[in-house]
Image: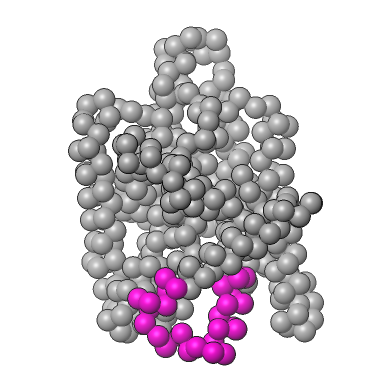
Amino acid sequence: MNQSKNTELSKTPSKRIFYYDVLRALAIIGIVFCHVSVSYVSRDINSPNLYISVFFDCFRDFSIPIFVMLSGALLIGKKDTLIKFFKKRLSRLFIPFLFWVLVYIIFTIIMNHGFNLDSALKIFFGTAGTLGVHFWFVWMIIIAYVGIFIINKVMQLDISINDFNQRFITILAILSVIYIGLSHYQLFNPYSPRLTYYISFLAYIIIGYFLAKCDFLEKRIDRKYLIIITALLFIGSYLWYIFCFVVPRSHLVHQFVRLSYFNLLILFMSANAFLLFKYLSKTKSFIDMENNRLGNAFTTISNYSYGIYLIHYLVLYCIKINLIKFINFTQGSSLIWIPVLVIITTAISLAILSILDKIPYLDKVTGKK
């Protein structure tokens, strides 16, 4: 094997990386925000309050890409065999998924007073308009694992090219940006068919690995300036997205309008958020945070992030149908009620998973890392 392949870009981390945990925790909270706020967006579509509900709802537009980018950062470069690679990951992915799909189906049977095969299959496959709408993510990740394994095998080939892995990943990252650009300008439709949609997320997986491992900018620009630049770019692009695109367009057509994940603006926001925490992770205050209460909270949420993703939609539904009996939160301020419902939903989801984690056999369904 050519020794030059052992470049900084191709190194695989040997220990837990705290800023990955922070990003994962913030991403899952962002997804809960979007599922909580969707009903407020519909309510406020012709109101000035739309700015508030859309601000919270659009957290998903960079949260999902960050989730996927983290998979690339963690899994590309692994030297597992086919059986080991998929056994290790599919068991952690599929066992919790099957359990919670069953829970969702049973809940639907109770609510509808009967079993419907079509409804059960739609939940299983994450079809829009069902209680299991968010399960699409599981199928996408399974497809992504296949792509990651193929990339890893190419990186392990004995090819006599200096810095082959670095060049290979750089080319893949450039092609990924080009692919998202083609989708941005509607020269390609990644949403049809569904399999194409799932495969398209490989672009974010590759970009995530590239951003995590490449230190090109850090070698040329002082880290404190990189933190300021990426923070300003992320905040600026997100506010522009909300105030200059989503809300004006939504008001114009009287329905919620948002961009596809495969859009250069979404990529730009997600990449800057990822890089911001990468640069922050090397500051003293961030390093110190790892062992304090806030850091432990981020790590705990990160550990249970997959389980929270699977369970939170049902928890939120139950909260809404029960809370409405006592408080008419649907007519309340979105600035207050969206964060409150997010906190309650996340806390209950985390509590349920923590309890299950202490029960033999059921600890396998929590999705805990």
Q: Chief secondary structure of the magenta span?
A: helix
User: Could you tell me which residue is drawn at 63 percent across and 48 percent down?
Assistant: 368
On-image quarter of the N terminus? top right
On-image quarter of the C terminus? top right
Q: Choose between 70 and 324: the one closer to the eye.
A: 324
Q: Choose between 189 and 153: the one closer to the eye.
A: 153
Tell which residue pokes out farthest to the front in this image.
292
Residue 28 rendering spot, x and y as whole percentages: 49, 57
User: Could you tell me which residue is drawn at 76 percent across and 55 percent down?
Assistant: 359
Q: Does the magenta stretch include residue 337?
A: yes
Q: In this view, does 139 lie to the left or right of 287?
A: right
User: Could you tell me which residue is drawn at 52 percent across and 35 percent down?
Assistant: 16
Residue 63 rendering spot, x and y as whole percentages: 44, 55
The vertical placement of 185 against 284, above or below, is below
Q: Choose between 308 and 77: the one closer to the eye.
A: 308
Q: Give the range drawn in magenta.
A: 314-340
Q: In this view, does 114 lie to the left or right of 228?
A: right
Residue 22 rendering spot, x and y as whole percentages: 44, 47
User: Could you tell me which residue is drawn at 55 percent across and 13 percent down?
Assistant: 158
Residue 270 rendering spot, x and y as whole percentages: 37, 49
Q: Is residue 243 left or right of residue 6?
A: left
Residue 190 visible? The answer is no
The vertical placement of 347 against 250, above or below, is above
Q: Is residue 6 magenta?
A: no
Q: Can you tell which quarter of the image residue 254 is in?
A: bottom left
